Amino acid sequence: MDQRAKPGMVLLAGNSHPGLAEDVARHLGVGVGSCLVYHNTNRETMVDIQESVRGKDVYILQTAARNVNDIIMELLIMAYACKTSNCKNIIGVLPCLPYSQQTKMKRRGNISLRLVADMCVKAGFDHIITVDLHSKESQAFFSCRMDNLRASPFFLQYIIENVPDYHNAVIVAKSPLGARRATSFADRLRLGIAVLHGEFKDLCADERDDDDGRASPPPPDQAAPDRTRIYTIGPPLPPGFSKEKPPIYLVGDVSGKVAIMVDDIMDDCKSFVNAAQVLKDNGACKVYAMATHGILSRDAPKLIEESCIDEVIVTNSVPHDTQKAKTAKIKTVDISILLAEAIRRIHNKESMSHLFRNVTMED
């Protein structure tokens, strides 16, 4: 339909997922707004809004696909371009929020999502819509309004309609941290749960010795040229004990049952592949892997094809047509109707609570 079918609304899309933008626009009965986003010769991002947005609510759809740093710059510049064109409100529709996994401080690192949140607000966003945040507490990083939608109803419907004999299934958490999500799925399907604990032993690049200056005071066998420095205050501090996970093992029974792993992000897939092998070794007859955001980077399609995972189910929050062409095990659940309904309700100033019916905080 013509864009005028929804007065006061403009839906714009960056280069990250044009297919999803078209699906959302079709549900809304509008067209995707005319906006040119490209890079010049030195890779600077250029944005040209080719229609009037003055006094309108602008919805910008962008997601964390490949080249995520380019995607962020496109998003920020598009928002700033709309802001300087005197639009009424700017609402970011970010199904997979960039840098959403970087929410914890590690050694001398940083919490990058906080920086991304500040940049989004500074660029002009009044409202952010996302789906299944990796850490729900990270909503507090954003000083604008935010809605964290859930994709779990779509997965539950898929299980009921497409998993044969799903009553004989077990919902599996890949780690104890995912046990709440697994319990939420299992309670609504009236199924049992299993939890994988531990880790596969591998050399970790992050493990470093204390030779980077963190050891203080210096060992006593070292000379102390500076006599003005106080090196001890009495008894030494307790040495503490390093945290070490045991080899991976399964808590629960999957023998002769269908194992369904659930998580929010599926990236390089190694943890899913390793977990699936443990489930098969413990007697699972079939293994399904479900995740909201199927980033599937690097050799993920090859790993999935060669693994004992029978089927991988992800949403279309991230484009993965290339990955699907490499293996027939990847299936897609369409959530464009969820994003479209959220946009419709926000534009019409209706309550968003309808979208959270029968959805738990653990999803």
Image: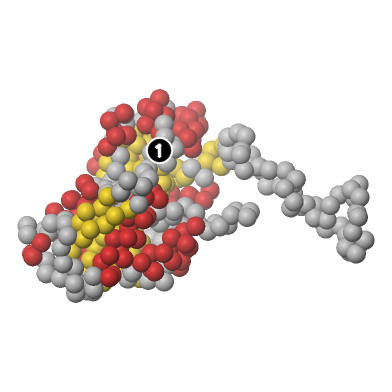
Image point (26%, 66%), residue name: 82
Residue 217: x and y, percent? 83, 56
- The picture quadrant where one finds residue 321 is top left
Give the residue at the far front of this rendering: 41
Q: Residue at x 18, y 51 (%)?
A: 23
Rendering colour mode: secondary structure
Question: In the displayed structure, does residue 277 sit left or right of residue 363?
Answer: right
Q: Is residue 243 left or right of residue 355?
A: right
Q: Position of residue 238 (x, y in %)?
A: 81, 56
Q: Is residue 241 in view?
A: yes
Q: State whether residue 220 is above or below residue 255.
A: below
Give how far across and how far down residue 69 sits, in percent.
40, 50
Determine the image quadrant of residue 248.
top right
Residue at left offset 91%, top offset 54%:
224
Tell me which amino acid carries mark 1: Ser
- Residue 147 is situated, as x and y percent measured from the top left of the image, at 34, 65
Query: What is the secondary structure assignment of the residue under circle 1?
Result: loop
Quadrant (top left, top right, bottom left, bottom right) of the N terminus: bottom left
Residue 346 makes an appearance in the image: no
Left or right for 239, reference 291: right
Left or right placement of residue 289 versus residue 245 in this view: left
Location of the C terminus (image quadrant)? bottom left
Which residue in the protein does label 1 denote?
297
Nearest to the observer: residue 324 or residue 238: 324
